[in-house]
Amino acid sequence: MEIAFVFGRLVFSILANVYQKKLSQHPLHPFFMVATSYVVLSVLALPFVPVVHAASLPQAFWGNVLLAAVLDVGGWMFMVMSLAKTDLSVFGPLNAYKVVISMLLAIVFLGEVPTLQGFAGVAIIVVGSFFLMPANGQREANRMLLLLKERGVQARFLSILLFSIGTLFLKNAVTDGGPLATLVFWSLLGLPLVMLANLLFIPASVKESTKTSLSHLPTIASIGVMIFIMQYCTLVLLSHMLVAYTLALFQMSMVLQVLVGYQVFKEKDILRKLIAAIVMMLGSLLVISA
């Protein structure tokens, strides 16, 4: 049964990314796009409020779900910004750095010392990402530096960091309240947070983006539904404590996103990026199994 949730998470995550990237090609600010997704998430979550019995949820649940909502709103905002500025075939493989960041967080907050296998996996990920940038002319010796200078790549790393920390609180919330209650209040608490972020950071873009969004309502609704299903799958997997197993299978999405980038968006240099994605996937699996 768990494998169905893993592949459900994979499929709906990739589909949501494709639709988000397509939507970003219109004059819609990435932060506003995230806000529209949270509107849909909240509409979907509201009918479940009477079912989850909020009054019976422990106090620890509310603190964890609030912190997860804050971090994930930021994660989504930077993630969609990255999608708008980066090829999907580059965006996808960068997901390998999630295990690197998780390892660094474990070192800093848990005092864990990685094994040699873990360090080897990180080295392989770095080598793989080196090949995400083309090797022509001046770029040959500076591909990694050029990759890190890309605004879309920087936004992707920020999103991965925020999501990685947020997962710790999501896991605690799921333990205290279950997947459905966590999904419902994660969605509802995220809406005012993302609305506030839009008013603070892009007040001039909100009006124009609102007008533009009216002609894309079916796409916006589809993205919200996909994220809702994807997040539920993620929370069910967290509730079963299958974190390492889940992370390992999630790495498949790197290769799939490269192929989707080529098929849907006609992105170039796919063979090189596919090789990079496979190398990075192997590196991340090495870290996870360490």
Image (cartoon, rainbow, N blue to C red):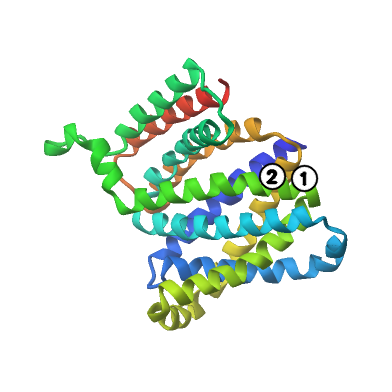
Which secondary structure, mark 1?
A: helix
Q: Position of residue 191 (x, y in %)?
A: 61, 69
- Dots 1 and 2: beta carbons under 8 Å? yes
User: Measured from the top left, where is residue 45 in percent x and y?
Assistant: 73, 66
- Identity of the amino acid at label 2? Lys
Residue drawn 42% across and 79% down?
203
Q: Which residue is pictured at 65% across the width and 52% down the height?
A: 231
Decide: few, some or many residues near mark 2? Use Cα within 10 Å; few <14, some 14-19, many ≥20: many
Q: Nearer the viewer, residue 131 or 65?
A: 65
Could you say which disc has been placed on residue 175 in the image?
A: 1
What quarter of the picture does the C terminus occupy?
top right
Q: Where's residue 271, x and y in %?
A: 34, 34
Looking at this view, name the residue that lies furthest to the top.
Answer: 116
Residue 85 in the image, given as x and y percentages of width and height: 34, 56
Q: Is residue 217 left or right of residue 211?
A: right
Label 2, secondary structure: give it: helix
> What residue would you read off at disc 2?
171
Alpha-carbon neighbours of circle 1 within 10 Å: few (<14), some, or many (≥20)?
A: some
Three-letter residue code for mark 1: Thr
Q: Residue at x 49, y 78 (%)?
A: 215
